[in-house]
Image: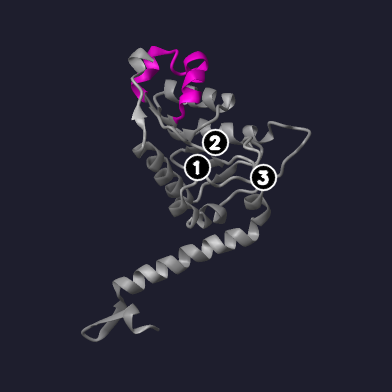
């Protein structure tokens, strides 16, 4: 073991701060390298530019707990039939997205109506659509539990609940792949998604819903 990795206190030895950081770096990088190997086709066929570099190098924690769901061409909305029941169990939603998924909007609206909360970061283009189509913002009674933020650039669809991470990425042609949504209930993956949401939130502006 490298000498800088350990420190001696009396008769006992423990990892030094350098050792702790190097160990954690190797563990997280190992996960990500494993992800690149096991999910190479998916990664090569999708646009990951919307994920900041600092999150790309730790994306292995998302792959580790990813639930594999086989596509069924005969049932185009099969993935939504899996996601919506999971959303029905949640009461807190963190969303960063540059697309609209009507089924998920309705599920989030039901949760907010039952006392849940919703924070959404989105783009100016989607804000225009929300003014016309939002199922939540039309109901003034739900606005106290809804927060909406605007950001100039988002290139993914992220939703995080208390227990699950949902992540959809664009294909290389910039269309969203909503049939291959990454779903994970692993605590590290959920925390990864939560931190990614707050990354987008930190560079956004809050929308005044009273005049929206």
Disc sitting over residue 52 in the figure: none
Boundaries of the magenta span: 122-145
Tell me the quarter of the picture where residue 198 sits. top left
Which residue is located at x 36 percent, y 33 percent?
204
Give me the C-alpha separation between circle 2 and circle 3: 14 Å
> Residue 127 colored magenta?
yes
For label 2, the SS is helix
Question: Looking at the magenta stretch, what is its main secondary structure?
Answer: helix
Badge 3 density bin: few <14, some 14–19, many ≥20, Cα 10 Å: some
- Residue picked out by circle 1: 164
Tell me the quarter of the picture where residue 117 sits. top left
Comparing labels 2 and 3, the label whose residue is closer to the camera: 3
Q: Which label's residue is closer to the chain start, 1 or 3?
A: 3
Badge 1 density bin: few <14, some 14–19, many ≥20, Cα 10 Å: many
Q: Nearer the viewer, residue 185 or 125?
A: 125
177 sits left or right of 7 in the view: right
Which residue is located at x 51 percent, y 47 percent?
185
Vertical position of residue 196 compared to residue 130: above or below = below
Q: Which label's residue is closer to the chain start, 1 or 2?
A: 2
Residue 113 pos. (x, y %) = 43, 20
Which residue is located at x 58 percent, y 35 percent?
83
Whether label 1 touches label 2, CB < 8 Å = yes
> Residue 148 colored magenta?
no
Give me the C-alpha separation between circle 1 and circle 2: 8 Å
Q: Nearer the viewer, residue 128 or 143?
A: 128
Residue 184 pos. (x, y %) = 54, 47
Q: Looking at this rendering, what residue extends furthest in the bottom direction?
A: 11
- Residue picked out by circle 2: 86
Residue 200 pos. (x, y %) = 40, 39
């Amino acid at each position: 073991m490298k000498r800088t990795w350990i420190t001696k206190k009396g008769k006992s030895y423990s990892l030094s701060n350098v050792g702790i950081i190097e160990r954690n770096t190797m563990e997280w990088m190992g996960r990500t390298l494993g992800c690149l190997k096991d999910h190479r086709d998916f990664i090569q066929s999708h646009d990951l530019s919307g994920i900041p570099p600092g999150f790309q190098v730790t994306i292995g924690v998302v792959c580790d707990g990813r639930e594999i769901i086989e596509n069924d061409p005969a049932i185009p909305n099969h993935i939504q039939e899996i996601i919506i029941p999971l959303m029905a169990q949640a009461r807190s939603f963190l969303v960063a997205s540059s697309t609209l998924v009507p089924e998920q909007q309705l599920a989030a609206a039901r949760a907010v109506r039952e006392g849940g909360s919703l924070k959404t970061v989105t783009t100016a283009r989607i804000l225009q659509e929300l003014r016309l189509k939002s199922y939540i913002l039309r109901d003034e009674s739900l606005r106290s539990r809804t927060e909406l933020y605007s950001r100039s650039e988002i290139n993914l669809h992220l939703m995080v609940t208390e227990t699950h991470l949902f992540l959809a990425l664009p294909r290389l042609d910039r269309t969203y792949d909503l049939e291959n949504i990454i779903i994970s209930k692993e605590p590290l993956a959920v925390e990864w998604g939560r931190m990614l949401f707050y990354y987008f939130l930190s560079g956004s502006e809050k929308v005044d819903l009273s005049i929206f």
